[in-house]
Image (spheres, rainbow, N blue to C red):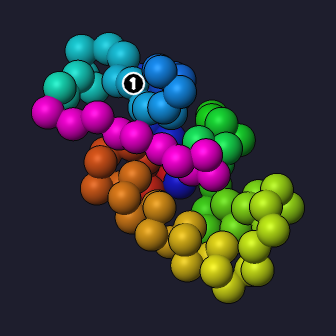
Amino acid sequence: MKTKKGFNLRTVCGENIIVAEGLDNIDFSRIINLNESAAFLWKNIQEKDFDVDTLTSFLTAEYEVDEQTARLDVVKLIDEWDKAGLIDKDN
């Protein structure tokens, strides 16, 4: 998987949000807000291939979380990113 081009993380008023840049990505009906750990993951996967194992490793290395909990959270996060059109799962 990879993040789609044109989606960038910005901090606005202390909130981490994904901003769509470019005409192909503009959809003002939704704002994608990321918590601290999701923003951390987003920053670390830009222009890189990733999978559930990659993100799980990032979480367990950075935060005090067990692997099982991290994996469950990562699966949910990837699903949310996929539904929001932020990632390309065909890579």
Taking the view exactly as shown, the residue that stands out farthest to the front is 13
Percent coordinates x, y for residue 25 in the rendering: 27, 26
The picture quadrant where one finds residue 72 is: bottom right
Label 1: few (<14), some or many (≥20) within 10 Å?
A: some
Asked whether 22 or 15 is in front, the reply is 15
Q: Is residue 34 visible?
A: yes
Horizontal relation, residue 5 to residue 43: left or right? left
Q: For the view shown, which residue lies furthest in the top direction?
A: 22
78 above or below 84?
A: below
Task: Please give the residue where the numbered disc 1 appears in the rendered image.
Answer: 19
**SS at circle 1:** strand
Q: Is residue 44 magenta?
A: no
> Which residue occupies the extreme right position in the image?
61
Q: Which residues are magenta?
A: 29-38
Q: Residue at x 18, y 28 (%)?
A: 27
The answer to which of 25 and 80 lies nearer the viewer is 80
- Residue 61 point in image, percent of width and height: 85, 61
Q: Residue at the left extreme? A: 29
Looking at the image, residue 82 sits to the left or right of residue 14; the answer is: left
Q: Is 33 covered by the magenta stretch?
A: yes
Q: Is residue 36 above or below residue 65?
A: above
Query: What's the amino acid at mark 1?
Result: Val
Q: Position of residue 14 (x, y in %)?
A: 53, 27
Asked if 58 appears above or below 5 in the picture, the reply is below
Residue at horizontal 67%, vertical 44%?
A: 40
Tell me which corner region of the image, top left, top right, bottom left or bottom right, holds residue 29: top left
Horizontal side of 88 relative to 2 (left or right) equals left
Front-lying residue, 14 or 38: 14
Q: Is residue 45 visible?
A: no
The residue sitting at 66% across, 73% down in the picture is 70
